[in-house]
Amino acid sequence: MEGYDENKNHENDSRDEVFSKAVRAGKRTYFFDVKSTRAEDYYLTITESKRRFNNETQKFFFEKHKLFLYKEDFEKFKAGLDEAIDKIKELKAQQGEEVVEKIASDYTDLDFDDLGNDAIKSED
């Protein structure tokens, strides 16, 4: 093939994909791929992959959703993600406190002195 340079094409492939990390989370797998542009700039692709079953073909397939995140958006994206995660943690902590408070309030009418008196009365 005229003008084809196998080494040059391999260099382009390795330049495009800089880093890849797969994170398995239950039925989903998330792929974080750092890639470079021709101008040697970097961006991130986040891919969610879920294994699904097609009832018509009776075969499994992977449903994928991809998000492209460019360097100029990294800080805003990270700040938004951190804020959302912090809010979830805060809400979950509040739910935990509410459960503890409810359990505690259910037993606030209990007087341990009364228990002792009942035990003494029943012995008489």
Image (tube, helix red, strand yellow):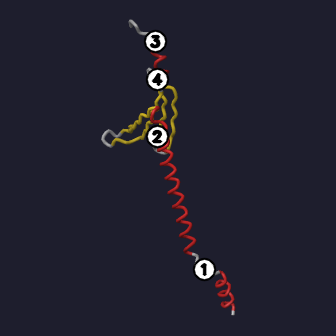
- Identified at 55% across, 63% down, the residue is 97
In the image, which disc is placed on residue 6?
A: 3
- Between 8 and 83, the one nearer to me in the picture: 83
**Mark 1 residue crowding within 10 angstroms, few (<14) / some (14–19) / many (20+):** few
Query: Residue 16, how many percent across, how many down?
Result: 46, 23
Of tags 2 and 3, which is closer to the observer?
A: 2
Residue shown at 65%/87% (left/top)?
A: 118
Real-space Cα separation, disc 2 to disc 4, in angstroms: 22 Å
Is there CB contact under 8 Å for labels 2 and 4? no
Callout 2: SS? helix
Q: Secondary structure at mark 4?
A: helix
* Inter-mark Cα distance, 2 to 1: 51 Å
Q: Mark 1 sits on what residue?
A: 110
Q: Earlier in the sequence, mark 4 or mark 1?
A: 4
Spatial CA span between label 2 and label 3: 38 Å
Q: Earlier in the sequence, mark 3 or mark 4?
A: 3
The extreme top residue here reads 2
Q: Position of residue 84 (x, y in %)?
A: 47, 48
For disc 4, the neighbor class at 10 Å (few under 14, some 14 to 19, many from 20) is: some
Which three-letter amino acid code belongs to the residue tagged 3?
A: Glu
Q: Residue at x 47, y 16 (%)?
A: 10
SS state under label 3 = helix
Q: Residue furthest bottom?
A: 124
Task: Give the labeled residue for mark 4.
Answer: 16
Q: Secondary structure at mark 1?
A: loop
Residue drawn at x 54%, y 58% is 93
Q: Earlier in the sequence, mark 1 or mark 3?
A: 3
Q: Nearer the viewer, mark 3 or mark 4?
A: 4
Residue 77's disc number: 2
* Residue contact between numbered discs 4 and 1, judged by CB atoms under 8 Å: no
Q: Nearer the viewer, residue 117 or 108?
A: 108
Q: Quadrant of residue 61?
A: top left
